[in-house]
């Protein structure tokens, strides 16, 4: 089948992010035992990934459960978002920009409530691609099979007509399991070459 859509992940792909260790650093700063923030906030992080809580509810939970001040919560979340956003993968972003209008282009990202607005401000992603699917807006995460189905509907293609680029091997495998032509991101050059090889078939 001819490829009609090229779809990208964000974190670790279109944006290069550092390890998310903000919680460990803040645990040390606040005198909390290692792993406290992750344990106490686990259900909130999970809910935020599929849009079941608001940003205000995330902040309230962190304040109340960890007995923090509003200022401390604001500082922790600012640190979290700095790491979450990372820095632009400019080579790959320019490649994605050049694919239109020959192909439909899109984003399919496991995300967190508040990500769209911040990533738009940082990277202008809504202007880069034809459509964006965020897990916190769709109410489900990759590798949920229903999310792959939603992506195909939104991009107007059959699975075999889509190339999908992700940096997580298990998600690449999951996409391939439903027939999507998935590519594992390792570097901009490698990824672009791999996508072009699929497009040339």
Image: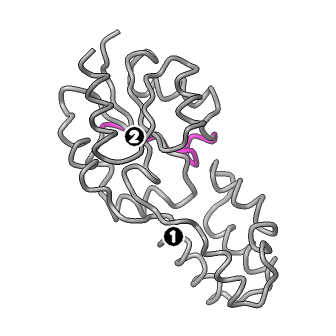
* SS of the residue under disc 2: strand
Residue 139 relative to residue 175: left or right: right
Quadrant, the N terminus: top left
In the rendering, at what x and y percent does residue 116 appear?
A: 45, 55
Q: Which residue is pictured at 36% across the width and 37% down the height? A: 106
Pointer 1 residue: 81
Q: Which residue occupies the foreground of this view, 60 or 175?
A: 175
Percent across and percent down for residue 171 are: 57, 36
Mark 2 and mark 1: Cα distance apart in space? 20 Å
At 54% from the left edge and 23% from the top edge, which residue is drawn? 149
Above-or-below relation of 14 to 161: below
Image disc number at residue 8: 2
Relative to 148, residue 131 above or below: below
Asked if the stretch drawn in magenta spans residue 44, the answer is no
- Label 1: few (<14), some (14–19) or many (≥20) C-alpha neighbours in 10 Å: some
Query: What's the residue at 48%, 44% (across, down)?
Result: 167
Most foreground residue, 48 or 96: 96
Q: Earlier in the sequence, mark 2 or mark 1?
A: 2
- Colour convention: one colour
Answer few, some or many: residues within 10 Å of disc 2's Cα (few below 14, many 20 plus, some between 14 and 19): many
* Image quadrant where residue 74 sits: bottom right
Res. 94 mark: none
Q: Residue at x 42, y 15 (%)?
A: 160
Q: Secondary structure at mark 1?
A: helix
Q: Tell me how many marks there are.
A: 2
Give the quadrant of residue 194. top left
Residues rendered magenta in the picture: 130-140
Residue 201 in the image: state x and y as whole percent. 28, 14
Q: Are marks 2 and 1 in contact (CB under 8 Å)?
A: no
Does residue 171 appear to the left or right of 29 in the view shown? left
Q: Position of residue 78 (x, y in %)?
A: 52, 78
Q: Is residue 36 left or right of residue 106?
A: right
């Amino acid at each position: 089948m001819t490829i009609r859509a090229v779809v990208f992940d964000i974190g670790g792909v279109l944006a290069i992010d550092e390890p998310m260790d903000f919680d460990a650093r803040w645990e040390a700063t606040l005198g909390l035992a290692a792993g406290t923030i992750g344990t106490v906030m686990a259900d909130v992080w999970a809910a935020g990934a599929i849009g079941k809580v608001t940003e205000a509810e995330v902040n309230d939970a962190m304040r109340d459960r960890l007995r923090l001040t509003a200022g401390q919560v604001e500082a922790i979340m600012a640190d979290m978002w700095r790491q979450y956003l990372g820095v632009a993968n400019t080579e790959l972003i320019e490649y994605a920009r050049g694919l239109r209008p020959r192909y439909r282009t899109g984003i399919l990202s496991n995300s967190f409530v508040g990500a769209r607005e911040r990533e738009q401000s940082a990277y202008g992603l809504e202007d880069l691609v034809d459509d964006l699917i965020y897990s916190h807006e769709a109410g489900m995460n990759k590798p949920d099979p229903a999310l792959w189905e939603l992506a195909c509907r939104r991009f107007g293609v059959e699975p075999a007509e889509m190339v999908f680029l992700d940096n997580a091997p298990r998600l690449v495998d999951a996409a391939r399991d439903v027939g999507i032509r998935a590519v594992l991101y390792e570097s901009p050059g490698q990824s672009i070459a791999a996508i072009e090889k699929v497009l040339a078939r």
